[in-house]
Every structure is written in C-alpha cells, then in structure tokens.
Amino acid sequence: MDAKRATLRDVAAEAGVSRALAGFVLGDDHGKSIPEATRERVREAARSLGYAPHGIARALREGSSRVVVLSIDPSLESNYSRTFARGLNDELAAHGHLLLVLHEHSAPVPERQILDTISPRAVLRLPGNYLRAGHELDDGGWEGGFAANVLLQVSYLADRGHAAIAVALPDGGPPLGPVRVRFAREAAARAGIREPAVLVVPRSRPAAVEAVREFRAAHAAVTAVAAYDDDVALRVLAALRALGLAAPGDLAVIGFDDTDYGALVDPALTTVHVDAEEHGRKAAREVLGLDPGPLAQYVPGRVIIRESA
C-alpha cells in the first residue's frame, strides 16, 4: 500500500482492531486499559503501512500547545489580514506549530466551544489591541505600526498641497473606525493641516453617490479623501463618476491596503501598501516566546502612486 495513503482505518484493519482502539493506541492514551500485545500489534501495523497521524489531529489530541488561533473580524477580511495570516502561519510552521483561522461570522458560542476543545497555545484577534484603551500603539505605533501607515497616507496628501482632507469610512460602524479617525486627526496635526472631516460611504452605489454629494456640499474646502481601505476608496471613485466628477481633479482619493482591484479601475487607485507578512511573523515569534530577531522592527508601509491622488 502507498504509505502516503495509509489511514487510521487501514491501520485498524491491518491490526485486526477497531478504528477507535487504533486511535487510542497511536494517540498514546494510557488512560485506556489495552493489553500491551494489542498496543504493539497496532504500532507494528502503523510502521509497516508507513502511517503518520495528521498534524492537526495530533495537535488537537495533545491539548494543542502547538495550535495558535487567529480570529478575524469580518470588517478586517482584507489583503492585510490575508497576508498577516500567511506570515503568521509560515513562522508558526517553521517552529512546529499550527494555525487555525476563525472568521467571526457566527455567534460567539461556537467559537468558545472550539477554543475549549483545542485549548490553543494562544489566541490572536484582529483588530486585537487596537480596541483596548492604551494599547493602540503596541504594534509599533508611529514608528511602524498602524498609526505610522495612517500618517503615511495623510502625509502623502498634505505633501501634495491638500490642506483640507476627509477620512472616508465604511458604513456599519467598523470596530477600527474610531481608532482610524483618531490616528488620522493626529496625523493631520503632525502634517500641519486642519483636522479631517469624516465621510461615511455606504456600500450601496445610489446611497454612496448621495453621501458624497451631500458631503461635498457641506465641506466645499475638502480636496482629498484618505479612505479606510481600498474598498471604500473605490466606492468614492464610483460616486464621483456618477456625479460627473473626476479624481484627482475634483477630489483626490487614496486607498489603504493595496488590493488587486485598485490597479484595474480608471483612474487607477493610489493606495498604501503594508507588508503584513512581517507583522504576522513577528506576532508568531511573540506568542511562542521567541526573540523577534530581525523582525523586531516592522517594515514600514509605502505609497503605491497611481492616478487617483
């Protein structure tokens, strides 16, 4: 039999025992009263078939000191969260650990049941510390964290002569909304421009058009928009087009997160790219209690300059 295809059922059949009993033996469950001769027969069957327990199943059986859980709020399912998870997973795997990603679409009870079952080594959450008062700058803050990348976005606009800007947020009250506005206000002060106004852009195209129309009527001095993410920036661009306006001539627009779609629209979206893989790798080393080494400092973001701002 091909060793790569050997399953627990195959081992049980070869040893002449039940699948459950084979699982107890190979899981080193000494709480079960199983004759040593039977244990050895199962182990020999596993060796002869080249059976190797699935890594995740093994980690779950062992109480999961090898499992780290990443729980992602739906509003943060983005290029940032995907690349963060990739870096986190790669670094954990390099140290013999497994990553389990939970998406918070369901009620908290199922998640609690999962965590109680696997007893993970650590649970990380996005947006995590940003929602804990006094911990918003734990990621590197103004030197390389979320705040620094908001400053990069706002400063890009200020350096191009925009003295009055808006922060564009999605509707629905995203968890990071208040933190983002606070960072943008501080960034504007550092860049020497006035405090940004706030523009909430609905997902519905007609509602977004109306929101942008009303905002421009009430804030005629605003010449640029720093969007919460690329999705919101694209909503603004679509609304401008529907209103017979254009970016950057009528209103400059810069996104955040550098998704693939930004390069495909007209005008192509200027945005902020963040190297979230390095953030994920650093987070992995922190939860494992390892020296972050060369990952001690976050890789700063960079502006992807296109046509919209």
Image: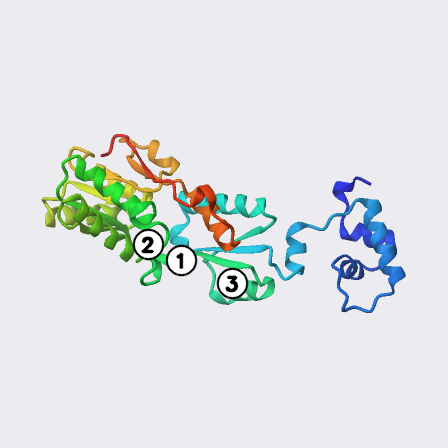
Residue 264 is situated, as x and y percent measured from the top left of the image, at 35, 31
Q: At which x and y percent is residue 89? A: 53, 46
Outermost right residue: 37
At label 2, the amino acid type is Leu
Q: In the figure, residue 33 lies in which quadrant?
A: bottom right
Location of mark 1 (residue):
128
| Residue designated by label 2 | 137
Side of 82 where 193 appears, left or right: left
Q: CA distance from mark 2 to mark 1?
A: 11 Å
Quickly name the residue at label 3. 111
Residue 138 visible in rendering: yes
Disc 2/disc 3 C-alpha distance (Å): 27 Å
Q: Looking at the image, is mark 2 or mark 3 nearer the viewer?
A: 2
Left or right: where 134 falls relative to 96: left
> Relative to residue 188, is residue 270 depicted above or below?
above
Between residues 19 and 286, which one lies in front from this camera angle?
286
In terms of depth relative to the viewer, which is nearer, 308 or 128?
A: 128
* Nearer-N-terminus badge (2/1): 1
